[in-house]
Image (cartoon, rainbow, N blue to C red):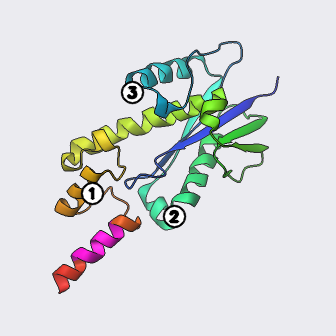
């Protein structure tokens, strides 16, 4: 039996904190109904499926890069690093890794990138769900700490409401200061102070 691992990330396009990546090897003997791209599932359905995946998968792992790593490496390389950590965190070595998207981490296991893989390959769908549920729980913690940004709703993505909160309160410690819209906002605020 060839062991295939699915890998997907969440948080790459956000403007707060790090990037979360899940790697998952499903058990062909224990199929899970309803796997698809996590963005197409309700939060409740995602949580139900995440529990089933954790219970039925041969193994799974979450890799993460920190806010500092995103700011130091840039979000692209931080995402690849989180992917590498997720795959290396598996207690079973897969024979092949399928990654959602077009970029693959540098690992010594055969890797294939698949555009829209989170809808096409069940192990990527499972990874997508695990990463999203993990990150969403952290966004709720950030929301409790910094309620003015409404992270429980926007999950750190730059919605109109989030931009308004940023212009009113400035960024919090969890925001990516190197992210262009936030960097420009900080530059404007510094100009206003020094001017």
In the displayed orientation, state which residue is furthest to the top: 29
Identify whether 15 is placed above or below 182. Answer: above
Identify whether 162 is placed above or below 184. Answer: above
Q: Crowding near pointer 1: few (<14 within 10 Å), some, many (20+)?
A: some
Quadrant placement of the N terminus: top right
Does 186 lie within the magenta span?
A: yes
| Circle nearer the N terminus (1, 3) | 3
Residue 51, percent across and down?
48, 20
Residue topped by disc 2: 74
Q: Nearer the viewer, mark 2 or mark 3?
A: 3
| Circle nearer the N terminus (2, 1) | 2
**How far apart are labels 1 and 3 at the CA level?**
24 Å
Residue 92, percent across and down?
70, 31
The kind of secondary structure element at disc 2 is: loop
Residue topped by disc 3: 43
Q: Which residues are magenta?
A: 182-189
- Residue visible at 74% across and 31% down? 4
Report the front residue among 40 and 71.
Answer: 40
Q: Crowding near pointer 2: few (<14 within 10 Å), some, many (20+)?
A: some
- Magenta segment, principal secondary structure? helix
Q: Which mark is residue 163?
A: 1
For residue 193, say whether it is visible: yes
Residue 170, percent across and down?
22, 63
Determine whether, in the image, residue 156 is placed left or right of residue 96. left
């Amino acid at each position: 039996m060839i062991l295939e691992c699915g890998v997907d990330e969440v948080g790459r396009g956000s403007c707060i904190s790090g990037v979360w990546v899940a790697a998952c090897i499903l058990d062909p003997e224990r199929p899970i109904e309803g796997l698809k791209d996590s963005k197409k599932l309700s939060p409740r359905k995602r949580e139900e499926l995440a529990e089933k995946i954790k219970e039925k998968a041969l193994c799974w792992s979450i890799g993460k890069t920190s806010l500092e790593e995103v700011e130091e490496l840039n979000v692209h390389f931080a995402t690849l690093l989180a992917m590498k950590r997720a795959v290396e965190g598996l207690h079973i070595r897969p024979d092949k890794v399928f990654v959602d998207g077009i970029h693959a981490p540098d690992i010594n296991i055969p890797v294939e990138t698949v555009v829209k893989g989170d809808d096409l390959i069940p192990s990527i769908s499972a990874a997508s769900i695990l990463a999203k549920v993990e990150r969403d729980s952290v966004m709720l913690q950030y929301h409790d700490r910094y309620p003015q940004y409404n992270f429980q709703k926007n999950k750190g993505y730059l919605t109109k409401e989030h931009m308004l909160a940023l212009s009113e309160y400035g960024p919090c410690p969890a925001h990516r200061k190197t992210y262009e819209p936030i960097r420009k906002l900080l530059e404007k605020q510094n100009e206003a102070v020094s001017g």
